[in-house]
Amino acid sequence: MQEKSGDISARLQHPRRSLGNRHRSQSEKFLNLSKTDGKYIGWAEQSARQAILYDFTNPKNWKLLVEIKIILQDEIGIRAVLEELFTVLGRDSELLEQLKEIDMLIAGIDLLNAGLQVDPLDPDKWVNSIKSSEEEKQKFANRVRILDLRDPRANVLFSRRLERIKEQGDEDLFIELERILLAQHPANYEAWGELGKLHERRGEYNQAWFCYDQSQTYFPSAKIRDSFRERMEAKMDGGESKPWVAPQITERIDFLNRMQRLATPDNHGGKKSEKKSEKKSLEHETMVQKVMRLKKSGRIQEAFFFVRRLATEGDQDAIKMLDQLRSELE
């Protein structure tokens, strides 16, 4: 059976430590060989890149690539690696602009080490830095509320951090921040399903239904929303005093509107420029025009929730476009 390109990209977005270790080991071997034969340094760099591709959560992979870039005297390459790491960490890559006068060949590895020390890639090490400080936890929450976490790797990293917060018992904060992550990466049907289970356990059945509905939208064969409905109907048969009724269309639309607002951070360039533009001209956009504008400005997640809302209202053109947007998000 042929594997969908979306499945391949999804696998690469999740860390695969064994493959990352294998490529890093190869890179280190080529790096040693390059001491006597310079042709191996290029192979060392290529293997180091592969190590990061398969496991971006291991700091050793990032450090090795920067060390190779230093040997190659590739200052531009070092900046590119740091920018990529900043993206994964949810940091503002524009911070590097403040360092443009610094010689990366000299300071690059120190900047990398400092960044990883302040913001560990390992979620267990990270949680140790905040678990005893409510102030640090709130600082993290405030970061999530404004960060652009649409990069799949950043989304995975922050999702793991949120799991640690949930394990500490702060379910309310977890739910709030997890919704932000899912708004920016709506194709993560597994996370939608897990969030639905949490809401269901808490007795928040409408919220559970919204999450299961999103999950089944991306993975129809799992029928997770349908199974939830069956469980709720079984409760009714068992004599529940207040039978549950699936959310009305207006409630579903409100939920999708909220997710659309969360899908793009307020400080995103596209949103900023939109605020300065003529609102009247935007009010008369067709659905297709709005979707194209959002996609052009890098806001496809926002476009997805916009079209999903129209589809929920019964718009046939939106229903047709929904499949296209879903495949683009995978």
Image (cartoon, grey):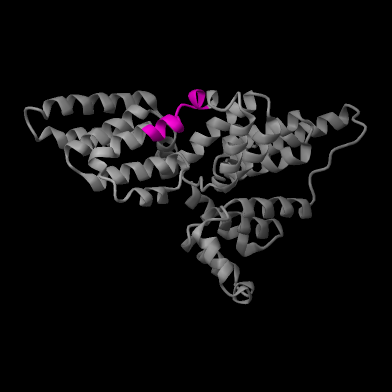
Q: Position of residue 102 (x, y in %)?
A: 29, 46
Residue 225 on image: x %, y %:
69, 38
In the picture, measured across the screen, residue 175 lies left or right of residue 32, that is right
Name the quadrant containing residue 242: top right
Q: Position of residue 128 (x, y in %)?
A: 53, 23
Q: Quadrant of residue 85?
A: top left
In the picture, which quadrant includes the N terminus? top left
Q: What residue is at 40 percent from the left and 32 percent from the top?
A: 116
Residue at 17% x, 40% y: name it: 72
Q: What residue sits 59% from the left and 38% below the top?
A: 139
- In the rendered image, is residue 56 in sight? no
Residue 31, position as x, y percentages in the image: 17, 28
The residue nearer to you, when weighing 96 against 255, is 96
* Of the pair 267 and 199, the residue shown nearer to us: 267
Reply above or below: 13 against 32. below
Left or right: where 47 falls relative to 3? left
Region rendered in magenta: 114-126
Farthest residue in the right direction? 241
Tell which of 186 and 236 is nearer to you.
Answer: 186
Please determine whether, in this image, residue 145 is positioned above or below residue 18: below
Secondary structure character of the magenta stretch overall: helix
- Residue 55, image quadrant: top left
Tell me if residue 83 is in the magenta stretch.
no
The stretch drawn in magenta includes residue 121: yes
